[in-house]
Amino acid sequence: MVNEPIDVHYEKAPWPIHLDWVGIRKMKASMPLDLFEENKCKEYIASIDIYTDLPTSMRGSNLSRSVKVLVDESVSCKKPWDLLERLTEKVLAVHEYSRKALVTLEVPVVINDDSFVFRFGLNKDRKKRTRYILSLSTTGITACPSALAVSLHRAKQKITHMQRAIIEVSIASNQPINYMEIPGLVKSVFSGNLKSLLSRTEESFLVEKVFENPLFTEDLARKTISYLSEHLKQIMPRDTCVEVKARSFESIHNFDIQVMGRICW
């Protein structure tokens, strides 16, 4: 009988420091998901992170166990939160030395010609304490209200600069987050939305619309927080936080503008 090789993972850590998170990051996988609760499965190319904590009694984490769990659970179609529940439970089961697990699932999605990146996260410990995290990012258009106001005063004309802007939203709660209305709410915040194909007439109408609704990056962040909190307070419990990051890729400046804000209830 051949002796089993020594597993150095189980050696004591030479530097006895408990590590908060150890794991795999951005593992790509094709998986069937029922993303929009229509009982319809679609294949998505997803990016997955799987982490656990690591005690000082372990020199290294058995990361292949996490990969095996992911491969096994990627076969059948599931809703995102159901998938993360299964993954966190099974990851904790195979990492017997860990006290908590964090799994995230990132999926790019196109809805009605609008591009979004969804990121679902679930943090769970052995006491069943759970934190659900939904992140979403998308891009739109803003117009500068300051330049517009000055041009109206000086030249009696609507002249201003436009730029693309990104909104990144993160919602955290102790319950699964209903995200069906979130993409539409976030898209409605911008001065205008990006279009892949426009006729010249449609292009002029879009520019006019953007000029009618100029926004600072600060406006963008505050408006997003306001819209989301008003909606979520009706359906989510009093342990929910909304964080928003708005970033403007300035067209006439040699820098970007970034604004961050949050609200909890």
Image: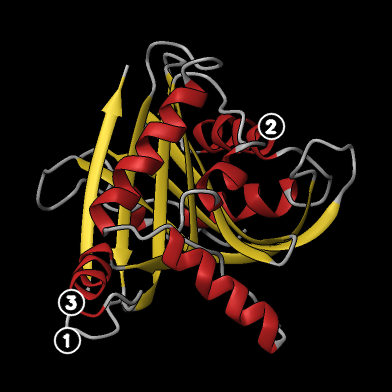
Q: In the rendered structure, which amino acid carries the disc numbered 3?
A: Arg
Q: Residue at x 22, y 61 (%)?
A: 258
**Residue 188 rendering spot, x and y as whole percentages:** 54, 49
Of circles 1 and 2, the one toward us is 1
Circle 2/circle 3 CB separation < 8 Å? no
Vertical placement of residue 235 versus 241, above or below: above
When asked about the image quadrant of residue 93, the answer is: top right
In what quadrant of the picture does the C terminus appear? top left
Extreme residue in the front direction = 156
Q: Nearer the viewer, residue 252 or 69?
A: 252
Q: What separation in Å lies between label 2 and label 3 (alpha carbons)?
A: 58 Å
Residue 82 — which label? 2
Q: Residue at x 50, y 23 (%)?
A: 232
- Name the image quarter holding residue 48: bottom right
Closer-to-camera residue (244/85): 244
- SS class, disc 1: loop
Can residue 97 be seen at all in this image of the molecule?
no
Question: Is residue 11 shown left or right of residue 97?
Answer: left
Q: Which residue is mark 3?
A: 154
Q: Residues within 10 Å of mark 1 (few under 14, many from 20)?
A: few
Pointer 1 residue:
254
Secondary structure under tag 3 reads helix
Mark 1 vs mark 3, foreground winner is 3
